[in-house]
Image (spheres, grey):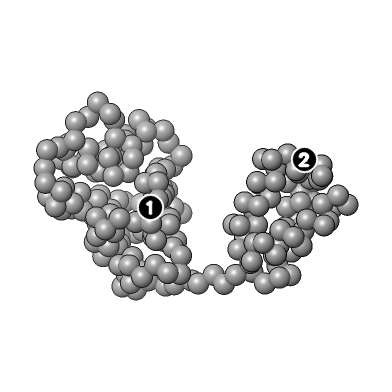
């Protein structure tokens, strides 16, 4: 059974470790890398978005920072005694430095008890899309019937929302995220009133 997971959003550089706040997350990382250099830990905390503002960043060149951070991360992954899942979201937004670091991280994952899940748009052709031994799962757009079903499930059965189902489904063009965002927008503007699965239309 997986004991831990880490989520990184390549757009906002946000992370989440077991749902912990920053203080607890730093303690968790320290426990998993007890032999790490304190300066390397600060680099790791900064990369994960959990650095204590009171901790000064080490004064080193960018390339040296990348090498030290890569070595520290890889050492921590290989030293883990229990399985872990690492989720890297929106890789199409990633910067070149982070991409290089994560590509080297992926190279050591097969030697650990870990799993990495990476999400990205079809146009992304970077290094994370070509990891050795990786399996790609391409998600095609929903067809018309599936999109209508998704929207209808979100809106609910009330007669006042029936006309919106096809309209939203057409605008979403098979993208389930767009369908949910369109519904959320209508709720935010007060056009839809209620909760998921039981909305009514005020207009």
- Label 1 or label 2, whichever lies nearer to me, is 2
Residue 102 horizontal/vertical position (percent): 29, 58
Residue 176 horizontal/vertical position (percent): 62, 60
Secondary structure beneath dot 1 equals: loop
Circle on res. 1? none
Give the residue drawn at x 65%, y 57%: 179
Q: Between residues 30 and 55, which one lies in front from this camera angle? A: 55
Give the residue drawn at x 46%, y 39%: 19
Q: Quadrant of residue 147?
A: bottom right
According to the picture, the residue beneath numbered tag 2 turns out to be: 193
Quadrant showing the C terminus: top right
Q: Is residue 27 above or below residue 60?
A: above
Q: Between residues 6 and 62, which one lies in front from this camera angle? A: 62
Q: Between residues 159 and 87, which one lies in front from this camera angle? A: 159
Spot the residue most to the front.
203
The answer to whether 145 appears left or right of 52 in the picture is right
Q: Between residues 20 and 175, which one lies in front from this camera angle? A: 175
Can residue 191 be seen here? The reply is yes
Density class for disc 2 (Cα within 10 Å; few <14, some 14-19, many ≥20) is some
Q: Distance of mark 1 from mark 2, alpha carbons?
A: 34 Å
Can residue 31 be seen here? The reply is no
The answer to whether 149 appears left or right of 138 in the picture is right
Secondary structure beneath dot 2 equals: strand
Spot the residue most to the top.
54
Circle on res. 10? 1
Residue 168 horizontal/vertical position (percent): 71, 58
Q: Quadrant of residue 173?
A: bottom right
Give the residue drawn at x 42%, y 69%: 123
Residue 50 horizontal/vertical position (percent): 33, 37
């Amino acid at each position: 059974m997986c004991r831990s997971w880490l989520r990184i959003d390549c757009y906002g550089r946000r992370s989440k470790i077991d749902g912990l706040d920053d203080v607890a997350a730093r303690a968790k990382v320290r426990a998993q890398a007890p032999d790490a250099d304190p300066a390397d830990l600060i680099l790791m905390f900064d990369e994960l978005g959990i650095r204590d503002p009171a901790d000064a960043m080490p004064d080193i060149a960018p390339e040296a920072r990348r090498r030290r951070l890569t070595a520290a991360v890889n050492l921590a992954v290989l030293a883990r005694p229990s399985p872990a899942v690492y989720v890297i979201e929106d890789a199409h937004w990633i910067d070149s430095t982070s991409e290089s670091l994560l590509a080297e991280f992926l190279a050591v994952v097969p030697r650990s008890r870990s799993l990495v899940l990476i999400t990205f748009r079809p146009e992304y052709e970077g290094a994370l899309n070509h990891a050795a031994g990786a399996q790609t799962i391409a998600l095609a757009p929903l067809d018309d019937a599936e999109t209508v079903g998704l929207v209808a499930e979100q809106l609910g059965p009330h007669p006042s929302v029936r006309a919106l189902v096809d309209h939203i489904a057409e605008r979403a063009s098979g993208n389930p995220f767009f369908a949910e965002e369109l519904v959320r927008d209508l709720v935010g503007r007060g056009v839809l009133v209620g909760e998921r699965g039981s909305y009514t239309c005020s207009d």
